[in-house]
Image: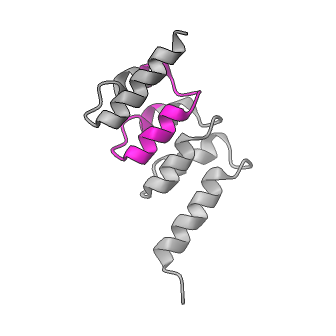
Amino acid sequence: MTELPYARSTSQDVARAVDPAVTGSELLPYAVNRSAIVRAAVAARTDCPVGALISLGHDHEVAVLEALLRNVRTHSSVVRALADHRNQTIADLAAQRLRNSFR
């Protein structure tokens, strides 16, 4: 069975997005990738540029936002904004993170 070009591209992009050798500005194209899986991989990286983390805070995919909220480097302003998210799971995760930051 042959792999679809889109699937191959996505799997290659995920591999690059999680590759520790890909750093800094090299991550930026993956932060705006059409695949939510790739964007989530970038959002989870603790070495993700701050600007990309802020931009990813506006993503519409729950998986991306969940990865972002689990990233310790995500700025508190992004977490506060996500605490008012229309998706209750995201709002709850953000609120929990805010509560934990004051312990």
Vertical placement of residue 33 versus 88, above or below: below
Q: Give the colour scheme shown.
A: one colour
Quadrant position of residue 46:
top right
> Looking at the rendering, in which quadrant would you find the C terminus?
top right
Residue 103 in the image: above or below residue 72: above
Quadrant of the image for the N terminus? Answer: bottom right
Residue 76 in magenta?
yes
- Left or right of 81, for residue 10: right
Q: What x and y, as percent, mark residue 29?
A: 52, 50
Note whether 1 is above or below 72 in the view shown.
Answer: below
Residue 67 place in picture, x, y as percent: 50, 40
Q: Is residue 70 left or right of residue 63?
A: right
Magenta span: chief secondary structure: helix
Q: Which residues are magenta?
A: 54-78
Q: Position of residue 57 (x, y in %)?
A: 41, 34
Q: Is residue 84 magenta?
A: no
Q: How many marks?
A: 0
Residue occupying image coordinates x 37% and y 42%? 59
